[in-house]
Amino acid sequence: MGSSDLGARATPLGAGAKIAILLAVALATLTWLTPNLAIPFDWVDAANIVVSAVFVTLPVAILFCASRERWTLRASILGLVLFALCSAGLTVLIRNAVGPTGLYAALSSIATVGWAGCLGFTVASLFRDKNLLLPAAIVLATVDMVIVFAPSGTVKQALGSEVGRAVFESIAFSIPTAGRAEPLAMIGPADFLFLGMFFLAIHRFQMNSRATIFAIVPALVLYLWVAIFFGHVELAGLPLRALPALLPISVVVLLANRKEFRLTQSEKAMTLVLGILCLAAVSAVVYAASNRAQTQRPSGRNESPMRAAASSMLTGPSAAAPVSK
């Protein structure tokens, strides 16, 4: 009787969790091995194209698969705490160069995706109506664009100081460079937070999860490639190496699930007003950034697209900025 009771109370891992674990092991292994690859110089750029695609796809797939499970609020908070503690402990070991730091860095990447994703699951657990995803996506994309593109935005202020940069680098997800120790790019935890939030909500409300994942992965990969190949270019005063990833994430979520939202006339009107206000805010920021760019003379220094991206970070609280060397 005891064994049957235990079996009844046990909650076995679902298929989503098992796949997520396998992908996490693959991600940690590749993170550890990639900087040590012996790659001919002429192949480095091509290798980094593949590396960047793989290291965007894997964490997104991990969160998507994990979100298929039944995450309660308690489980989400517990996961957040455990992964955050692991991340903090690994950061201390890495900074003090204790033991195999390469392995610790690989495990730290998993911990970052874990605690950020669990925080997103925690937020998603509070959603009671799938229609709330519509205004949430609009507002999040707007806020991300404002704090990244604003001439004196939060991201620029934080990354402009040594302390702010050090804090960001300690919590960000690093995309390694093939055959080199320095990272190719960094992704801030906010992107994984909101990916986790959207994925769990989409699964909970039985929305179009298949279309979402098959659109969001290539969208984010292409987004990173823009930063890699055109990071040295400015468009209307906005550097393409500083890209808010919540913009494509939100756009994909809304387009892939556009038929899932059922709004009343008043809700449609409120959403329209919200969209207009957000568009006005973004337009004002772009205008200010463009004016500021016109008053500053370019440095005149030419960089190859790949080299410019090799010292960049991607996205919002995940914003692109030089990586210290």
Image: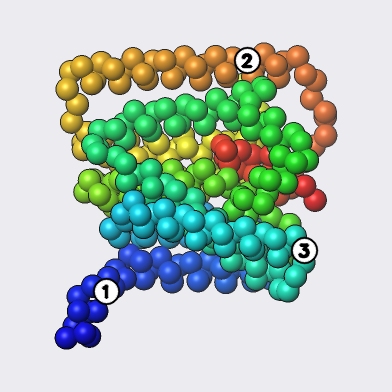
Residue placed at 63% from the left, 62% from the top?
89
Residue 226: tell me if it is visible: no
- Which numbered disc, 2 or 1, marks the residue that appears first in the sequence? 1
Q: Is residue 4 above or below residue 115?
A: below
Q: Position of residue 257 (x, y in %)?
A: 27, 39
Disc 1 marks which residue? 10
Disc 2 marks which residue? 288
Disc 3 marks which residue? 96
Residue placed at 47% from the left, 26% from the top?
142
Kindly report which numbered mark, 2 or 1, lies closer to the viewer in this rendering.
Answer: 1
Structural crowding at the residue carrying mark 1, measured as other residues with C-alpha within 10 Å and reported as few (<14), some (14–19) or many (≥20): few
Secondary element at tag 1: loop
Instruction: Please identify the quadrant where the N terminus is shown.
Output: bottom left
Residue 174: tell me if it is visible: yes
Q: Position of residue 167 (x, y in %)?
A: 68, 45
Secondary element at tag 3: loop
Judge left or right: residue 249 versus residue 112.
left
